[in-house]
């Protein structure tokens, strides 16, 4: 087995020299890497270096093995990885040393194994963008394309910093929509729980007490009993029916054509459709601004923006834009031609094209519609929450009134 002489740096910056046995240069680099050493020089020798090799190999045995297979990441983990790496690169570190620093940070958790694998691939000659794609599919084509642009232009730190800001903005955007749905969902679930409690427990208890009076049951009481008995006896049929309908609908929209119809229908729902449209405008504009601002051609940016859009109907619209732009049309005229985008947005894009600052115009448009989205969400929340509260109060109030009426009518019948 070949013997290699090396000069390397320890984690504390101390320089060390030695020899090790390895099958080839790449294997020798891997042994040094596993031993916690940063190689500065590695030369092939003819003599054996078993002692030094044993030292290195013993260190390797004590290291944790690298995780194999694709690593799935949460969006928050991608944001953290991007922010950490951009800060280290911005501080003047080269890519591999920056990844090594991240690898030694205990607070990064699962990202440590991710960083190790990326660093090993980069050290062995693979580009950073290819290493990202190979190590984790969670980065996606958009992220990897930006990383490739950063490598080519030499502005990887700047591009990663902008990408971190973009990912944070998209995460905040999704959080706004989810937060707006939490309180109404809680109210609806609470109302349903109260109704179920009335029908399955309180009404049967009340009717049992009234039966002991041997008085004639009022029609309202009889209606309540019939409804309660029906639901209690057939609840599993009702549940099966609901499950079948929901499952059938999910199966129906799995077909791409039906899914596209559903995606288009969601955009037409009163109140909520406007929020979904505005959310698309914000995400689409921020994606384009990020890509174009980082030096990607407009056509490539549109293609990546299409891939980042989950709505099939909106994908179709972006595909039309890509076709027109590919034929030489301007972005603003193309967006106007498809007839989906509002006039204000079209004007802002047109101004950017005229001034040669399309990236900045897209950013301003995204910020404008982000504020519009916040207003829409606040408006819907202010409208829908009182409506749900009043509806639930009326429903519970009607049931309580029916129960009280039954009690009073029964007592009146006994007194008569």
Image (cartoon, grey):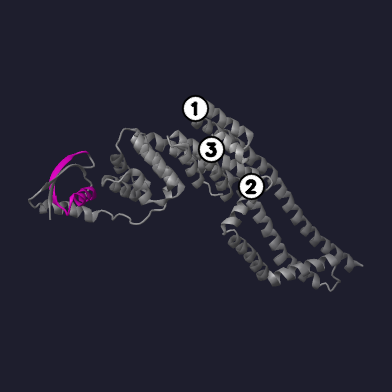
> Mark 2 or 1 closer to N-term?
2
Q: Residues within 10 Å of mark 1 (few under 14, many from 20)?
A: few
Q: Which region is colored magenta?
A: 13-34
How far apart are labels 3 and 1 at the CA level? 17 Å
**Image quadrant in which you'd find residue 210:** bottom right
Q: Give the residue pinned by disc 1.
A: 356
Give the camera-side residue of 344 and 412: 344
378 left or right of 320 in image:
right
Q: Residues within 10 Å of mark 3 (few under 14, many from 20)?
A: many
- Identify the residue at the far right of this view: 416
Q: Identify which residue is drawn at 40% across, 36% down.
A: 159
Q: Give the residue pinned by disc 3.
A: 285
Q: Give the residue pinned by disc 2.
A: 267
Give the camera-side residue of 400 and 344: 344
Provide the secondary structure element on which disc 3 rests.
helix
**CB within 8 Å, label 2 to label 1:** no
Percent x, y of residue 361: 53, 30
Provide the secondary structure element on which disc 2 rests.
loop
Residue 12 visible to an observer of this rendering: yes
Depth check, mark 3 against mark 1: the one in front is: 1
Q: Is residue 14 magenta?
A: yes
Residue 109 visible to an observer of this rendering: no
């Amino acid at each position: 087995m070949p013997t290699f002489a090396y000069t390397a740096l320890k984690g504390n910056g101390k320089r060390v020299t030695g020899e090790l046995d390895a099958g080839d240069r790449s294997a020798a680099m891997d042994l040094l890497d596993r031993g916690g050493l940063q190689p500065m020089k590695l030369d092939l020798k003819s003599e054996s270096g078993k002692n030094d090799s044993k030292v290195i190999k013993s260190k390797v045995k004590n290291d944790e093995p690298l995780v194999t297979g694709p690593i799935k990441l949460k969006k928050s983990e991608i944001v953290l990885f991007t922010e950490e790496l951009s800060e280290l690169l911005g501080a003047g570190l080269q890519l591999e040393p920056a990844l090594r620093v991240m690898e030694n940070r205990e607070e990064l958790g699962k990202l440590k194994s991710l960083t190790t694998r990326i660093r090993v691939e980069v050290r062995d000659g693979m580009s950073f963008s290819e290493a990202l794609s190979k190590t984790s599919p969670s980065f996606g084509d958009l992220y990897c394309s930006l990383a490739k642009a950063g490598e080519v232009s030499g502005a990887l730190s700047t591009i990663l910093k902008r990408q971190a800001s973009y990912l944070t903005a998209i995460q905040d955007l999704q959080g706004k929509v989810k937060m707006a749905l939490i309180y109404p969902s809680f109210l609806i679930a609470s109302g349903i729980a109260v109704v179920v409690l009335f029908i399955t427990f309180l009404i049967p208890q009340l009717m049992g007490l009234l039966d002991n009076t041997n008085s004639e049951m009022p029609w309202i009481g009889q209606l309540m009993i019939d409804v309660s008995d029906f639901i209690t006896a057939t609840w599993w049929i009702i549940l099966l029916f609901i499950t079948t309908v929901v499952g059938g609908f999910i199966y129906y929209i799995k077909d791409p054509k039906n899914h596209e119809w559903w995606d288009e229908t969601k955009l037409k729902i009163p109140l909520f459709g406007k929020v979904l449209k505005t959310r698309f405008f914000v995400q689409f504009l921020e994606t384009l601004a990020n890509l174009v601002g980082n030096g990607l051609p407009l056509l490539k940016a549109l293609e990546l923006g299409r891939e980042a859009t989950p709505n099939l109907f909106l994908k179709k619209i972006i595909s039309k834009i890509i076709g027109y732009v590919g034929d030489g049309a301007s972005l603003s005229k193309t967006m106007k031609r498809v007839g989906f985008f509002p006039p204000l947005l079209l004007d802002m894009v047109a101004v950017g094209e005229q001034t040669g600052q399309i990236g900045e115009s897209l950013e301003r448009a995204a910020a404008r519609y982000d504020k519009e989205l916040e207003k829409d969400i606040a408006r819907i929340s202010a409208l829908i929450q009182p409506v749900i509260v009043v509806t639930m109060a009326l429903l519970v109030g009607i049931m309580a009134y029916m129960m009280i009426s039954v009690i009073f009518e029964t007592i009146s019948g006994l007194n008569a």
